């Protein structure tokens, strides 16, 4: 064997003898609200691990901090909000964040401990709605859709109680933090509750809601990242992991129609 060929063979043998250096997974901090959003991300985590991502799931109990943390660079992504809410946050706070994927839809519901049906809710009943513009407005739009109230024309996605022009049953509206809505059921006649807060409180959106939003419209949730990150490879891997057959099967089995996939 020539010296040149011997050297090449020796190099190959040494390379084969060296242990393989495993590529370190990329850590992605992603914010969610407690309940279904967090549960779904736990199902995404092992799929993402196969694509080289180590998801660190961070729970926030309100709707403001996940976008604030994202803008500040404290996390890489969040998964908890729909487009009208994100657009409102960007307009109000100047966040440079972008939607990179649709995730799931949580049809809004109205719940009551006092009444078993919407028709049983009496004149003058007290109704709690969310105090943030998009979710509170969403609740009012649902009431209008069901014929309970009438709003000013062209109110868009963010009507408030001041936009009510007809209230034939003289409902009294109070505005509360969305996360506190389940607790308000002891104090009000009816409360509008987002599914991600209803489910952890033991409420079944498909059985317990006395009024429920149709699964349509702009209220599909999304994954948001900073605008500067939207084209990075990890974003593509995260979206593919979320949109995997494994995650879809988990959502369908776990939530039984209360949460609907958007892919």
Image (cartoon, helix red, strand yellow):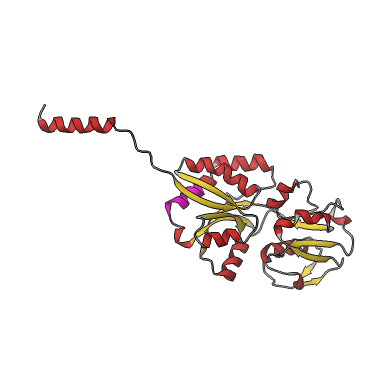
In the rendered image, residue 4, in percent from the top left (x then y), is placed at: 12, 33
Q: Looking at the rendering, which quadrant does residue 140 occupy?
A: bottom right
Residue found 47% across the figure and 45% down from its top: 53
Q: Is residue 199 left or right of residue 58?
A: right
Q: Is residue 183 left or right of residue 44?
A: right
Residue furthest to the left: 2
In the rendered image, residue 230, in percent from the top left (x then y), is placed at: 47, 58
Q: Looking at the rendering, which quadrant does residue 82 occupy?
A: bottom right
Q: Main secondary structure of the magenta part?
A: helix
Q: Is residue 236 magenta?
A: yes
Q: Is residue 243 left or right of residue 125?
A: left
Residue found 48% across the figure and 45% down from its top: 54
Task: Identify whether 249 is placed above or below 33.
Answer: above
- 148 or 184, which is in the foreground? 184
Task: Identify whether 235 is placed above or below 175.
Answer: above
Q: How many marks?
A: 0
Task: Identify whether 199 is placed above or below 136.
Answer: above
Q: Is residue 23 magenta?
A: no
What are the residue bounds of the magenta stretch? Answer: 231-240
- 81 or 150, which is in the foreground? 81
Residue found 76% across the figure and 70% down from its top: 161
Residue furthest to the top: 1
Task: Identify whether 146 is placed above or below 26.
Answer: below
- 258 or 49, which is in the foreground? 49
Could you tell me which quadrant the N terminus lies in? top left
In the rendered image, residue 105, in percent from the top left (x then y), is placed at: 64, 52
In the rendered image, residue 37, in percent from the top left (x then y), is placed at: 62, 49
Q: Is residue 8 left or right of residue 114?
A: left
């Amino acid at each position: 064997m020539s010296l040149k060929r011997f050297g090449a063979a020796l190099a190959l043998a040494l390379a084969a003898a060296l242990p393989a250096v495993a590529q370190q997974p990329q850590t992605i901090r992603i914010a969610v609200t407690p309940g279904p959003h967090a549960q779904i991300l736990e199902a995404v985590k092992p799929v993402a691990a196969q694509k080289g991502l180590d998801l660190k799931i961070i729970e926030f109990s309100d709707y403001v901090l996940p976008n604030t943390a994202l803008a500040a660079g404290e996390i890489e992504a969040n998964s908890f909000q729909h487009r009208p809410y994100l657009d409102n946050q960007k307009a109000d706070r100047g966040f440079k964040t972008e939607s990179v994927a649709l995730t799931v839809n949580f049809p809004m519901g109205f719940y009551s401990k006092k009444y078993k049906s919407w028709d049983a809710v009496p004149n003058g009943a007290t109704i709690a709605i969310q105090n943030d513009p998009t979710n509170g407005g969403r609740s009012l739009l649902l009431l209008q859709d069901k014929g309970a109230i009438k709003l000013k024309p062209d109110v868009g996605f963010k009507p408030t109680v001041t936009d009510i022009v007809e209230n034939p049953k003289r409902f009294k509206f109070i505005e509360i933090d969305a996360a506190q809505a389940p607790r308000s059921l002891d104090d009000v006649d009816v409360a509008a509750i987002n599914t991600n807060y209803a489910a952890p409180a033991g409420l079944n959106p498909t059985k317990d809601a006395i009024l429920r939003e149709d699964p349509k419209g702009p209220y599909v949730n999304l994954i948001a990242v900073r605008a500067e990150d939207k084209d990075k490879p990890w974003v593509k891997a995260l979206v593919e992991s979320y949109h995997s057959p494994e995650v879809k099967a988990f959502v369908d089995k776990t939530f039984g129609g209360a949460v609907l996939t958007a892919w």
